[in-house]
Amino acid sequence: MSSVAKNLFRELTVSCADCSLGDLCIPHGLAQQDIDRLDDSVSHTKLLHAGDILYQQGTPFKSLFALKSGSVKILAKNEESNDDVMGLYLPGEIIGFDGVATDKYQCSIHALETSNVCEINLESLQENIPHIFKQLLKHASKSINQSNNANSVSKASAEKRIVSLLLDLSDRYRLRGYFYTEFNLYLSRSEIGNLLNLSPETVSRGIRKLERDKLITLQNKRRIKINDLESLQNIITLS
């Protein structure tokens, strides 16, 4: 086995107790004995490549998933049966709450890059750690709050919508201990427009304006560097 393969295997099989996501994922707030029991309910072996589908809208609910690395996009069919981009999941976030109430997933999850997810068997989790649902409710609440924030932003100007997206991603990366002023944005301009209810052209103009104002730098089509975080925040709070 090559060294690259060995490192990947080690990444995939690390236990919940040793996972670097720590406080961001389910273990936060659990006793050590409960963290140890998580391994009986969690699989650490699901690897997605860019374009792979974790689950499809309308399929029966099977599991929750914890995103360990990478990023995925959330898609949902609209009235014309086209896919709308509803948001992104980043490491440490729990995927699949959309399927709990109806026993069917209400959206589809597509990998934006090579991503590693832990599959969580809900029935096994309840059996091994009966009081785990308080932790799961916290993650569900975060998902709802992110959705509410997205709805409020949708009424703002085009510039504010774009800036809000960049600040949201920056803050979420910061919470995960990642480099938060420079990151990849794997969504296309069309997908960003779909998410923010803007045309692709408006998105492109807005990003170019932020670059002309030296607030951000486009290092390539995907990688964005934030040069002035405070000024971006002022666009949201002062204008």
Image (cartoon, helix red, strand yellow):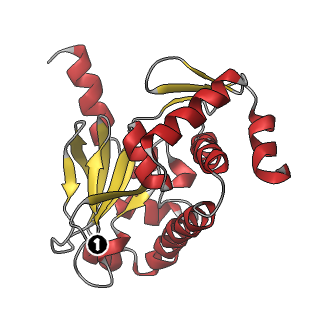
Residue position marked by numbered label 1 in the rendering: 106
Q: Nearer the viewer, residue 137 or 127?
A: 137
From the top left corner, tell me how far across and down residue 116 is, in percent. 31, 42
Q: Is residue 231 above or below residue 58?
A: above
Q: Tally the numbered discs.
A: 1
Quadrant for residue 113, please give it: top left
Instruction: Look at label 1 and name its amino acid.
Output: Gln
Name, please, the residue furthest toward the bottom: 102
Q: Position of residue 90 (x, y in %)?
A: 45, 47
Q: Position of residue 191 (x, y in %)?
A: 38, 45
Q: Quadrant of the N terminus?
A: top left
Q: Position of residue 198 (x, y in %)?
A: 49, 51
Residue 70 figure quarter = top left
Q: In front: 24, or 101?
A: 101
Q: Label 1: state its secondary structure.
A: loop
Task: Please give the name of the residue rendered at 44% of the width and 60% of the height, measured from the top-left corner.
Answer: 35
99 w.r.t. 220: above or below: below
Q: Quadrant of residue 235?
A: top right
The residue under the point 60% across, 37% down is 177
Circle 1 Cα neighbour tier, 10 Å, few/some/many (<14 / 14–19 / ≥20): many
Q: Is residue 211 above or below residue 193?
A: above
**Residue at image x 61%, y 40%?**
170
Is residue 236 among what the camera can see? yes
Task: Give the left or right position of residue 89, taking residue 134 as reference.
Answer: left
